[in-house]
Image (tube, helix red, strand yellow):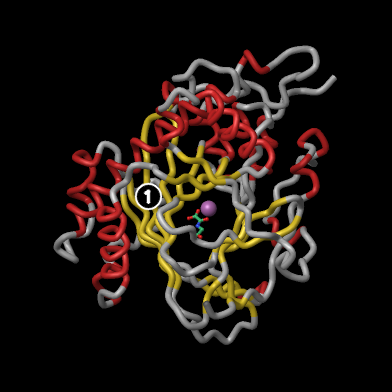
Amino acid sequence: MSPTVLQQADALHPALSDPKNVQYTYTDPLSEVPALSGVDASFDGSTPIIDMEGLLGPQRSEFIKQIGHACEKNGFFAVRNHGIPEMKISNMLDTARDFFHLPEEERLKFRSSDPDSIIRLVTGFQDKTRNIFVSRQSLKFHCHPVEDFKNHWPSTPPSFREKVGEYCASVRKVEVAILDAISESLGLERDYIDKLLKGHYVSINYYPACQESELDVTHGVRTHTDPTIITILMQDDVPGLQVINDDKWIDVNPIPDAVVVHVGDMLQALSNCRYKSLLHQAIVNCERERVSIASYCYPSDDAAIGPAKKLIDDDHPAIYKDFTYKEFHESMWRVKCSTAKRLDLFMAESD
Ligand code: OGA
Ligand code: NI
């Protein structure tokens, strides 16, 4: 595989590892963190791998412990034997590529500046103030239940609705199974998180092979955390994803037949920071385009997102106050911050 070009990366904000120290300021992490010299080359590539079949067998509790450990220590893990048929995955990736190979005017029909629209295309952009070109293009759309949304999706390529619908329905099942396991790993009722769930949306991410830009720095997607409970990321065979592990950037290269699960902001809040939202980014590849499919689940508007009561005691005081998903979602668009620092607004009063 050819080497990727990462021209700059952004470090883990130190305050994230101790949320009590976080300042009440909201700035984009790009402006406030030092640049790293690069990706940790010594990393042995050992992404924690969970075999989902184990969750269905007699050793379920052992697998739940593994998931809990991976969420707490790494903030991400890969899942094998997830049950999404290989054919549905390859159809999804092919459809994604076909969509992004359509003429621009066809794709731009889905462009929207409303972050709440059912479907919207986000294009790459230049941030001249920071000398950065962000090359990712994505098509983001709601998809649960599929039948309620699919008429809003592209009708070109002609198989889009069918193939994407099949993938979305399958990935939703994986998501629920993993969320059940995560609830149990925290010592909560199995359906604690499931009961908060409402929707699900997918972002088809397309990273063109290195594009020319007058700017010096090209990112695939800049450092961020996902504002979700968890994200399930399916990558094609082109590397690009990087995550923070032990305060260093590491590559999370595609593992055949596996999807990657990230902890998102909502899980950080409801686990009272036991599981921290994963800082990640994507770099671009000079020779090959890359496609990834991110599935995000989100709670209903009135879902209580603050720390689960069972996780609070004298030794573990609540780091966040009670708040609803609606409150978080509204604040997210006001507070221009792309990491879990946006949760600072909801911190519990300290004595
Ligand atoms: C995302 C994301 C990373 C990737 O869609 O939220 O972080 O590798 N994607 O595409
Ligand atoms: Ni992300």
Q: Residue 255 appears at what percent x and percent y?
A: 48, 58
Location of residue 140 by image quarter:
bottom left
Q: What is the total number of numbered labels drawn onto the structure image? A: 1
The residue positioned 54% from the left and 70% from the top of the image is: 134
Q: Is mark 1 within 8 Å of ligand 1?
A: no
Furthest residue to the right?
351
The residue positioned 83% from the left and 37% from the top of the image is: 21
Q: Is 151 situated above or below 321?
A: below
Q: Is residue 320 left or right of residue 98?
A: right
The residue positioned 41% from the left and 37% from the top of the image is: 175
Q: Nearer the viewer, residue 177 or 292?
A: 177
Quarter that holds the C terminus: top right
Mark 1 residue element: strand
Dot 1, how many residues are within 10 Å of its Cα: few (below 14), some (14-19), or many (20+)? Answer: many
| Residue with the mark numbered 1 | 202
Q: Is 320 situated above or below 222?
A: above
Furthest residue to the front?
58
Q: Residue 63 appears at what percent x and percent y?
A: 53, 31
Q: Is 30 situated above or below 66?
A: below
Q: Residue 71 appears at what percent x and percent y?
A: 61, 37
The residue positioned 34% from the left and 35% from the top of the image is: 173
Q: Is 94 situated above or below 296?
A: below
- Residue type at mark 1? Val
Q: Residue 221 appears at what percent x and percent y?
A: 55, 64
